[in-house]
Image: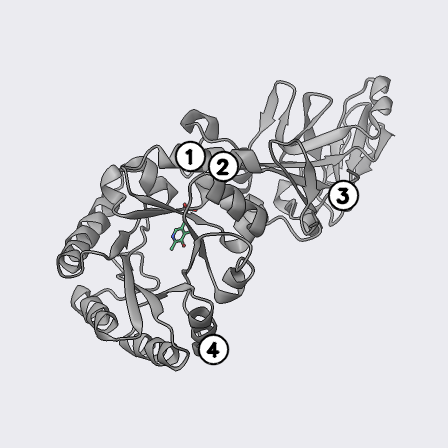
Amino acid sequence: MSVGRAVARVNLDAITCNCERLRAELAEGVRLCAVVKADAYGHGAIESARAAVAGGATWLALASVAEARELVGEVEARLLVLGPLRLAEVEEAVLLDMDVVAWQEDLVAFAGELARDVGKAARVHVKLDTGMGRFGVRDPARASRVVAAAAAHPHVELVGVMTHFATADERGDAFFGEQLRRFAQWAGEIKRAHPHVLAHAANSAAVLRDPAAHFDMVRCGVAVYGMDPFGEDPLARDLEPALELSSYVAAVKRCGPGESTGYGRRFLAQAETHVGLLPIGYGDGWRRGLSNNGEVLVAGRRRPLVGTVSMDSVAVDLGPDPGVLELVDEPAVLVGRQGEERITAEDVARRLDTINYEITCGLTARVPRVHRSNAGMERLAGEG
Ligand SMILES: Cc1ncc(COP(=O)(O)O)c(C=O)c1O
């Protein structure tokens, strides 16, 4: 397959295996909802969703109706829209049988009326804000009133009750336990009155951290893609990174003492060396904060990134050996493995003082996603 300047190769089998690995943490009957919002954290939504379902996910979570619409008819799973909804979105969600999150009685009533008009039932999950301080209501009594409104409406199906943790990835933090206690108490009361309701709270970190947080369903994103929710080495938790980002050495040039490469002359050669130029830059999501602050694998060795990251290119120091002039056209791995060496999204995130999520979500549409699975076939995103 011919790819251009840079490519993100996504191993769909890794996504399937990571889902199986997460399910192994869960008690019998606990459902796995794979979070595939933001184009599956940059991995390609449709292909990743199918791979997650192959690994046992029965639910898929998206941020908006627009994201969920992309998956309708493409994959066999319940679609849960996590985000806040505009009224026009509620209508489409009801028509397309999506599950929605609500925390306002009037939204539940509106969804119910719409559903009645089209002969359906609106599927609703009520959100309690146990401490994240984002969407959902903080007062359990108010949340219970929303639950009661949903349960009472003939065209609303009360499907779930949920919350979201603020600090599950900060091990040792006591607030996680506090949120868990608040949710368990409220969800317990709700389930006594409505035993069929699915309680769900856990993200990837909570799944790996505390079985008491699993309830009836877990919502995992980052770990599905083989990234570590605690920002550590994913392999240590048996997670397999699914995405590899690579480019190639498009040119090699001699750089004598005092000569520079890139904007602002931020790299000045101290001694004779060669710079390799890779056609990937911040226009692809390889951030400018990696200027003079990163590594790339070329010919099985780690090479330092030098100079300022441009929109379309970046330079690496290949050293003084003139033999490196032969490295033109060699693959360059920015995230992934080459020989014995490995660079993870977590490594890149640490350099940028951010989280692994942002590294893969930040890859722009200019980087083609190529998906591969066990048949060994590669397919460019959007191809058949
Ligand atoms: C409401 C909600 N649930 C679950 C997740 C998945 O979290 P993670 O990717 O940490 O597993 C997210 C992600 O942001 C979320 O917003």
Queried on whether the Cβ of the residue with tag 3 lies below 8 angstroms from ligand 1, the answer reads no
Q: Which amino acid does label 1 sit on?
A: Glu
Q: Which amino acid does label 3 sit on?
A: Ser
The quadrant of the picture occupied by the N terminus is top right
Q: List the residue tagged with mark 4.
A: 88
Q: List the residue tagged with mark 3.
A: 313
Q: What residue type is labelled 2?
A: Thr
Q: Which of disc 3 and disc 1 is earlier in sequence?
A: 1
Distance Cα–Cα, label 1 vs label 3: 38 Å
Distance Cα–Cα, label 1 vs label 4: 36 Å
**251 displayed left or right of 131:** right
**8 displayed left or right of 241:** right
Q: List the residue tagged with mark 2.
A: 16
Residue visible at 50% across and 40% down in the picture: 225
Q: In this view, does 195 lie above or below 247?
A: below
Res 273 quadrant in image: top right
Residue 179, which numbered label?
A: none
Disc 1 packing (10 Å; few <14; some 14–19; many ≥20): some
**Image spot of residue 364 (x, y percent):** 65, 52
Q: Tag 1, which secondary structure?
A: helix
Q: Which amino acid does label 4 sit on?
A: Ala
Q: Tag 4, which secondary structure?
A: helix
Distance Cα–Cα, label 3 vs label 2: 33 Å
Badges 3 and 2: C-beta atoms under 8 Å apart? Answer: no
Q: Which of disc 4 and disc 1 is earlier in sequence?
A: 1
Residue 20, which numbered label?
A: 1
Camera-nearest residue between 208 and 75: 75
